[in-house]
Amino acid sequence: KKKFIIDKKIKQIFKKKKILLRVLYKKKQYPGQARNLAIQKATFSNLAFLDISTFCPKEWLQVTYALLDKNIDIVYGSTNYLAYTYQSKLFRAATFGDRRLRTLPGSIIKKKVFKKIGLFSNIVRAGEDGLLFEKIKNLKLSFKSSPSPVDYTNNLNISFLFFFRKWFRNYYSSSSLDFMRSQKIIYLFGTFIVSISIILSLMGNPAIFKLVILLYVSLRGLLIPLVRSEKDYCFITFNFLFIAMICIWLDIAKTIGFLSYYFIKLFTNFNNKISQD
């Protein structure tokens, strides 16, 4: 059994400032379930969100909180994904990029917002934060963005197998969310193109398959990392090939996750129909 440990320095700061530190613990909860529990138990009107392995600068809370006013109920946070080793830099170039991304960690949201948009989805392991952002966007709620990003350092030095399992798990779980539809279409269409090119290659026409590989490496190994501000890294000798290889690994995991969701859903619906008949 893992024990939740609070650093002694943090305890001392909270004690000195006379701030009540309350930890809510329940076994086997998805992120949305855990956040919903905290929202329901919170007694104050403003809610600040952080996440595991996120580190906030000293000024984060003060400058972010200062942006709230009577017309602004939401201040979005952002995250810098830090990488220090060769492997972690490759993974960052293949995923998040060297840039600030809008994230739930680092955000402060007034509790009354959740009365308008509802709580987090509690049936998915990943994607519940993206669904929240989509609801806010659809309702055209006013917001500001915090100038103080939080830093994230974990999971960028983990093994290829860990990343594969995590990507599969997260994208399988989030496949049920409507805002993921366009991404699912892109990946399923890509799977169709790759399948056709492999079939043509086996039939003696490898040119299409080679073209697909060339386009993929150019897109995933160079163009997308450049857009994600990795220009100082992906042009180093052969790095773009390693980045593309990681992307292939992760894209396969995502595609299997999407396809698994559809097959299981199809099987479940078919089984239910037979049971009803």
Image (cartoon, rainbow, N blue to C red):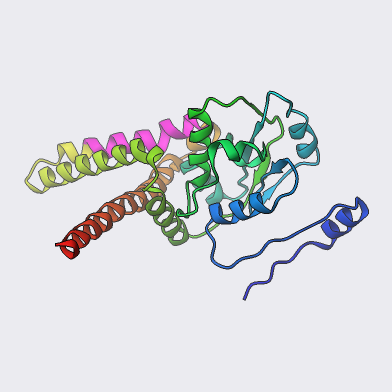
Task: Relative to 157, say whether 5 is above or below.
Answer: below
Q: State the image quarter where residue 61 is shown.
A: top right
Furthest residue to the bottom?
1
Query: 105 or 265, which lies in front?
Result: 265
Q: Who's the residue at 90% across and 53% down the image?
A: 18
Query: 85 or 167, which lies in front?
Result: 167
The magenta segment is 211-230
Let me know if residue 84 appears in the view: yes
Query: 179 or 210, which lies in front?
Result: 179
Furthest residue to the right?
16
Image quarter of the C terminus: bottom left
Let me know if residue 217 appears in the view: no
Q: Main secondary structure of the magenta part?
A: helix
Q: Is residue 134 left or right of residue 75?
A: left
Does the magenta-highlighted stretch encompass residue 4?
Answer: no
Furthest residue to the front?
276
Q: Who's the residue at 76% across and 41% down the image?
A: 57
Instruction: Give the image location of residue 222, x and y in percent.
Output: 42, 34
Q: Who's the residue at 45% across and 53% down the image?
A: 124
